[in-house]
Amino acid sequence: MTALEKATGDVVLKFEPFVLHVLCQELQDAQLLQPPAAIDSGFRNSGISVGKGGKIVMAVRSTHCLEVPLSHKGKLMVSEEYIEFLIHVANQKMEENM
């Protein structure tokens, strides 16, 4: 709260989702990882990409993100109680990522 009170610009609470990139030698290796390891584990934004040079990357991505403005031009726009709630929500998302 002290840092928020001292802020002169915009402050945003941002929680980024889990992302894991696995470089695979063969497309079959990436296909083995995707359904069982990623999608079946709840990481629905997962997928395989093949670059122009043939690089095969299996990306495991969570959908657990959060981005909430807290202040604007130095003015706090939310209550301390709401910030505590947001921190609780972000911590829950972190647990889900694990």
Image (cartoon, rainbow, N blue to C red):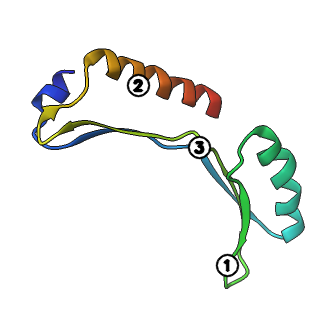
Q: Earlier in the sequence, mark 2 or mark 3?
A: 3
Q: Amino acid at mark 3?
A: Phe
Quarter of the image with the N terminus is: top left
Q: Is residue 11 visible?
A: yes
Front residue of 90/24: it is 90
The disc placed on residue 18 is: 3
| Residue at x 83%, y 42% (from the top left corner) | 40
In this rendered view, identify the residue nearer to me: 17 or 77. 77
Element assignment for label 3: loop
Is residue 30 positioned above or below 55 on the image? above
Circle 2 SS class: helix
Residue type of the residue flagged with mark 1? Gly
Disc number lying in front (2 or 1): 2
Apparent side of residue 47 relative to residue 18 in the rendered image (left or right) = right
Q: Which residue is mark 1?
A: 51
Q: Label 1 to label 3, Cα distance in Å?
A: 22 Å
Quadrant of the drawing holding the C terminus? top right
CA–CA distance in space, label 2 to label 1 = 38 Å
Q: Looking at numbered disc 2 in the image, what kind of residue is underneath it?
A: Leu
Which residue: 25% across, 26% down? Answer: 78
Residue named by callout 2? 86
Neighbours of disc 2 within 10 Å: few (<14), some (14-19), many (20+): some
Question: Where is residue 30 drawn, in percent x and y?
Answer: 82, 62
Q: Earlier in the sequence, mark 2 or mark 1?
A: 1
